């Protein structure tokens, strides 16, 4: 069996980024993070030119009231582990409080979203399908509970373009907001 090459890490003004395919070790606190105005900050690990093919993983930091996306269901399973703080999970139209070390498992087709809660930022480990997977398989319902929290599409759709219409999707890079030093 032929061994896998090690990916390169490059230092930037906002932290380290992975370049190219291969294995690597990257400290979350030293990585370059990304942020969208309404959707929190995240450390996605993968190289821009070598996205993960079989699964997606990120650490997301949400302030109270902020979600990492819109209420949705997809044809892939996802998992959410609260690393720090609290969040509110809206699952199948019902609210569920989550605290540090709580884990939410969503089989394919489960309607869900996590929202920062409490009085401090929430850090979540998110695991699921790779970012590059088709967004055509995502269902965004205008669920009343999700609407009340401002995390639902204005009308039910399968189009991410329609679901996120009017939301600022500008991505910026920043230094790690978590873990606290």
Image (spheres, rainbow, N blue to C red):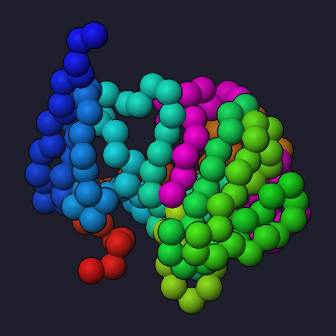
Q: What residue range appears in magenta?
A: 125-154
Image quarter (top left, top right, bottom left or bottom right) of the N terminus: top left
At a point 45% along the width and 25% down the height, the residue shown is 53
Q: Is residue 179 left or right of residue 139?
A: left
Q: Is residue 43 above or below residue 3?
A: below
**Residue in the image at 69% along x and 72% along y:** 98
Left/right of residue 17 with respect to residue 80 in the rendered view? left
Question: Hey, which residue is sitting farthest bottom in the picture?
Answer: 119
The image quarter containing residue 143 is bottom right
Q: Is residue 132 above or below residue 157?
A: above
Quadrant, the C terminus = bottom left
Between 16 and 138, the one nearer to me in the picture: 16
Whether the magenta-drawn stretch holds residue 128 is answered as yes
Q: Position of residue 62 (x, y in %)?
A: 52, 70
- Residue 163, image x, y percentages: 69, 46
Could you tell me if residue 62 is visible in this image? no
Q: Nearer the viewer, residue 166 or 109?
A: 109
**Most common secondary structure along the magenta stretch:** loop
For the point 67% across and 54% down, the residue is 70
Q: Is residue 125 above or below residue 122?
A: above
The tally of labels here is 0
13 to the left or right of 172: left
Res 61 seen here: yes
Q: Point out residue 93 in the picture as x, y percentages from the top left corner.
A: 87, 60
Q: With 41 as the anchor, is 145 left or right in this view?
A: right
Instruction: Confirm whether the magenta stretch covers residue 152.
Output: yes
Which residue, as the protein is rendered here, is positioned at the far top?
1
Q: Quadrant of residue 67?
A: bottom right
| Residue 96 position within the rendered picture, expressed as x and y whole percent measured from the top left | 79, 70
């Amino acid at each position: 069996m032929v061994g896998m090459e090690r990916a390169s890490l490059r230092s930037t003004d906002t932290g380290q980024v992975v370049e190219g395919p291969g294995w690597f070790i990257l400290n979350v606190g030293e990585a370059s993070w990304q942020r969208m105005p309404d959707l929190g900050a995240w450390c996605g690990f993968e190289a821009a030119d070598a996205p993960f093919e079989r699964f997606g993983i990120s650490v997301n930091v949400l302030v109270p009231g902020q979600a990492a996306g819109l209420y949705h269901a997809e044809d892939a399973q996802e998992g959410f582990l609260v690393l720090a703080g609290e969040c509110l999970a809206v699952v199948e139209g019902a609210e569920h409080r989550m605290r540090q070390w709580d884990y939410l498992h969503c089989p394919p087709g489960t309607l869900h979203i996590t929202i920062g809660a409490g009085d401090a930022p929430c850090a979540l480990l998110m695991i699921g399908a790779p970012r590059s997977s088709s967004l055509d398989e995502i269902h965004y319902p205008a669920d009343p509970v999700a609407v009340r929290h401002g995390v639902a599409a204005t009308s039910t759709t399968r189009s991410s373009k329609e679901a996120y219409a009017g939301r600022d999707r500008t991505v910026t890079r920043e230094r790690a907001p978590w873990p606290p030093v």
